[in-house]
Each structure stands twice: as structure tokens, then as C-alpha cells.
Amino acid sequence: MLDLEFFTRNTNISAKVVCDSISEQGVRLTTFEIEYPRFILAELNVHRQLSKNSSSSRAIPVQKMLEQIESNMAIPVYWGKSKSGMQASEEVDEDDVWWYEEKWKFAFDEVSYRVEQLSDLVEGKKGFMKALHKQVPNRLIEPFQMMKTVITGTDFDNFFNLRIHPDADPNICMLAYKMYEAMQESKPVTLKAGEWHLPYVDSCYEIDQNTQEKEGKLEYYVGELYTKGFKYISLEDAIKLSAASCASVSYRTEGMTLEKADKIFDMLIKAEVVHSSPLEHCATPVKPKFNELGKVRVNCSEPQSWEDGVTHMNKQGELCSGNLRGFIQYRHLLPNNTAWEFDYNERMKLFK
């Protein structure tokens, strides 16, 4: 059974808040960058209220993947004794943990040897056989991989309720605990409608030197504030930079440039098959309800009054956009963000 001391264990599971906003209506929108064992990815993905982008085994070269695992291996945070049922109620003796860890690492050594064979030229009966594409051998080492994910949502309570629990898998329990702690320590920035929540993009207001009050509109920038490399960027470029950074979580470095972001953004939305999920992390507060007699109604109960990007209203009368409440996702401002019709015959022509 997990106890309070469990949460003090040394682990490479981590969570940090990379963007934290709150609307004037009091709805909080938070984006995390989390790192955790890939073997709990399926449990994380069942939480549909949360938008996610994760590193991909198909995108990371085999040697780089092996190096990442060797330097930061996914190892169970709790070694439960064998018993019937889904939960291990008792852990192995503390003095024996090292033995299980060594066997886990030895399993990786065995698998990595086979992975290197599959990814190199090998001699066969008919000469040398070609190495396999990284998407195949990488699958074998996924159980040992630490996964990096960008995750955004307005409603984390159900996730915390299910996962910070003694009956939860200890690894996702630790992850949820780290996320909760990071969220408690973070202070959200108040955004008005038209101001954007943009992970990995810095923003600021001009400050009146006399009153120290914010003035003007929210500005987005790159570089260190007021240093040589500092410059303001447009909202359009800021959205591209944020979406591209979320999309490239598997290989993103600190050196994401506007030029590179522009190329990645075009790859997302201009491809034959549009990839819209990274655009779900970029969002702006829903405009306040306006219902004045004789004037155009805005965001009232009837759908025709909803602003662009609103997809539905929940039972509490709150306007939503995709899986966010009280915020409009950039994804839902694009007309082609989802395929509503699939032409099977046309698609099969691609398979020559």
C-alpha cells in the first residue's frame, strides 16, 4: 500500500508548469511539460479532457533513443510483490530492490543488443540485408523509455482524483502528485479575451513607470527581455512558435527559431492530412456574455450568438471549445481542423 513517504522517493518522473493563465471569469488554463515512463502512456491518454502532444518513437533515431535511455532510464518507482488482482498491496523488501533494478537494466541490455542488430546492416543468406527504419526497432525499447509530453487543460480535478490514489499505478500516482504540486506553486496570469495562452512563448505588458500599472496590450517577444537579442513578435508568429514548440516536444531544443517554427507550422496545417492537435495548447478566453436589448447578442444560450471557435455549451451553461472550458482553442478557429468526410476510394489511390 502506498503511503505518504512514497512521494518523497527519488525519481526521474517530473512535471513543470510552462504556461499558466486564468480568465477574467475565473477559469484556469494550465500547460505542463511532464516526463514519465512510457509504459504508463496508455493510462494518461484515457483522460480526454486534457490535450496532449508526446515524443514519438518514429521520430527519434535509434542511437539517440538508446543514449537517452542509458542516461535516463524508465524504472518502476515501486516494486510490488506478486499477488492476485490489479494492485500490489505490499512492496518487496527494501534490501532487495537493487536486485530487481539490476535485472530490469539487464533486460534493457539484452533488448538494446537486438535493436542495434535490427538497425544496422547485417549479413544474410543473400548478402547484406538493409537496416530497418527506426520506427520498427525503437518499439522494442519503449518499455525503458522516459516519455516527454506537453499537456494542457482547464479541468484537472478528475485526473488528480483518479490518479493520486493508493489504488492507482504507483508511477502515474507519482506523476499526478508532481503535477499537482507544480500547479499549486504556480501563479496564473490573468488574460482578457483576445490575449493568448501560448506555451513556450514569453509575453509582457508595458508598465507605467509612475503608477507601475499595466498599460497597452499584451505583447509577445523572443530573446531575453530588453537585451540585445530581444524583439517583439506578432501574435501570428507567437502562435506559430508556440504550436511548433508543442509539436516538436520529441526533439525540440532551446534554439527554436521563428523560421523553423514557420516551417513546422506549415507542415501541420498545410499537409494533405492536417495535424491539429498541437494547436489545442494555444487558447484565448471566451468573450463575456453580452445580452443588451436591441444590440447584437454575444455568447448567449443560442448557438448563433457564439463567437468563432466555440464548439458547445456544457450543462452548467459554460461555453467550451473542444476539450477546454471558457477558452477558445486556436485549433477550432481553423476551418479544416478536422476531417468530417473520408473518401476511401481516393485514399486507396495513394497505396500504389
Image (cartoon, grey):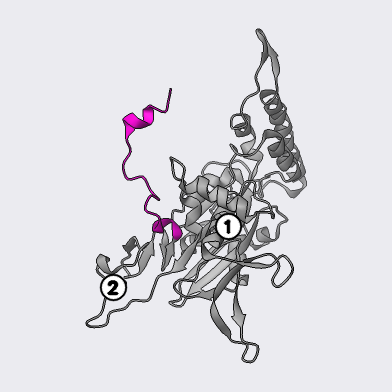
Predominant SS along the magenta part: loop
Q: Looking at the figure, which quarter contains the N terminus?
A: bottom right
Q: Looking at the figure, which quarter contains the C terminus?
A: top left
- Which x, y percent locates residue 254? 69, 55
273 magenta-colored: no
* Circle number at residue 83: none
Which residues are drawn in magenta?
330-352
Q: Residues within 10 Å of mark 1 (few under 14, many from 20)?
A: many
Residue located beneath label 2 in the image: 300
Q: Residue at x 77, y 43 (%)?
A: 98
Residue located beneath label 1 in the image: 241
Q: Which residue is nearer to you in this view: 261 or 188?
A: 261
Q: Residue at x 53, y 50 (%)?
A: 265
Q: Which amino acid does label 2 sit on?
A: Cys
What secondary structure is marked by label 2?
loop
- Which x, y percent locates residue 51? 48, 55
Q: Residue at x 32, y 62 (%)?
A: 312
Q: Distance between the residues labelled 1 and 2?
A: 33 Å
Relative height, residue 179 to residue 335 (above, below): below
Q: How many marks?
A: 2
Q: Which amino acid does label 1 sit on?
A: Leu
Q: Which residue is nearer to you in this view: 193 or 313?
A: 193
Q: Which residue is drawn at 63% across and 29% down?
A: 137
For marks 1 and 2, give the one nearer the viewer: 1
Q: Position of 316 compared to 187: left or right?
A: left
- Which x, y percent locates residue 77? 67, 50
Q: Position of 136 compared to 105: left or right?
A: left
